[in-house]
Image: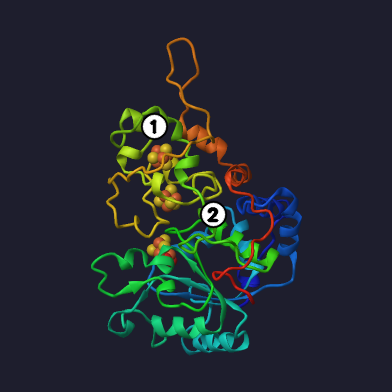
Amino acid sequence: MDLHRMFPREVPRREFLKTCLTATALMGLPFRLSSQVVKAAESAERPPVVWLHFQECTGCSESLLRSSHPTVSKLILDLISLDYHETLMAGAGAQAEASLHDSLQTNHGKYFLVVEGAIPTAQGGIFCKVGGKTALASLQEAAAGAAAILCIGTCASFGGIQAISPNPTGAVGVRELVKDKPIVNISGCPPNPYNFLSTILYYLTFKRLPELDNLGRPKFAYGRKIHEHCERRPHFDAGRFAQAYGDAGHAAGYCLYKLGCKGPATYANCSVQRFNDIGVWPVSMGHPCIGCTEPDILFKLPIDAKVQIHDPTPFDSYAPAHLKEKGKGPHPVTTGLVGLAAGTALGAAALFAKKLPAQVEPHKADSHEADSA
Ligand code: FSX
Ligand code: SF4
Ligand code: F3S
């Protein structure tokens, strides 16, 4: 597929470097390794990628490709050789099937398999078919020759919305079905495109996959709770909560915990590496986090349900907020302004990185990682 022609990649040098630096910081790597990351991004090596869609809304691809600022999507398309992607490819029908078959044969053992969407398993998997084949059969065939599997989104990672009880199609995530391949789960509904980009860059730089948490997610992106770096955190600590949408506390940027914010139980970097290149994320827009990266929260807990706070974590990203006293003292920290000011991609990523345990050199391979990948 000639994506070079479909998505011309004139990424200005300054934007290219800035994106690489942001990814370096996001990965928790020290600044001195940024030149290695840049070199890897510039290298001619472009791992072959086969991208399959199953039960999902395609929001993961959409959010990746339709960013207001196209550097991330262009860079991703530049870093990989995207051999098959049902949403993007021009071919259809038998031609597309032939292309998939060719790709799996030619690059056997070398390609990355990206999976978007859950896989239905009930009744032999008849609930999702592409080209007459069940998603289950397509996954098994493509997984067999993959060097590693990247699950993009919570659907592919854990089943997502399709797997919600009573789960009539028996939808599951990839790791329930594939046991003999390294699997990286980049959860989120949809995930932040930077987390996908950084995973690819990590692999290109160190020739191995990043360290993963117990849910198979890269620790650099899912190692901390969003509550730890939320700009509304000073209000949480001070006991100031929005009680209803649109009330004075909500308008003043108070904490959204009482509206059901799942931030205290959600591992993700959204409060730091924000979305849409304009420094926004759900909480900065006034909506509680719904825990979209977490298999036991997303769609399983009602939006207004309060999560238990088991281990209150100290915050140190933002200065404490003080109530304004008439005529003196500091003004209350207003969330939107602080959020936007703090949301510049590089600064925000660096903020997250400084909180991570030192991850200077790539760690030793474990069972999650691709030895040959
Ligand atoms: Fe799922 Fe992705 Fe949510 Fe949608 O494709 S993670 S429903 S944003 O798009 O898989
Ligand atoms: Fe934590 Fe959510 Fe409140 Fe932010 S809005 S401080 S993430 S509970
Ligand atoms: Fe998802 Fe919560 Fe981030 S809903 S996008 S994990 S703020």
**Residue at image mark 2:** 221
Which amino acid lies under the numbered mark 1 shown in the image of this protein? Tyr
Give the image quadrant in which the ligand numbered 2 is located.
Answer: top left
Q: Quadrant of the N terminus?
A: bottom right
Mark 2 or mark 1: which is in front? 2
In the rendered structure, find residue 254 and report the number of the disc placed on it.
1
At x 71%, y 53%, the residue is: 17
Residue drawn 46% across and 45% down? 226
Q: Is residue 58 visible?
A: no
> What is the secondary structure assignment of the residue under circle 1?
loop
> In screen coordinates, is 98 left or right of 227?
right
- Residue 200 appears anywhere in the view: yes
- Quadrant of the snapshot with the C terminus: bottom right
Percent across and percent down for residue 294 are: 40, 57
Q: How far is mark 2 from mark 1, CA to CA?
A: 26 Å
Report x, y in % for residue 158: 39, 66
Based on the displayed image, in which of its 4 quarters is residue 362 positioned?
bottom right
Where residue 105 sits, quadrant-wise, is: bottom right
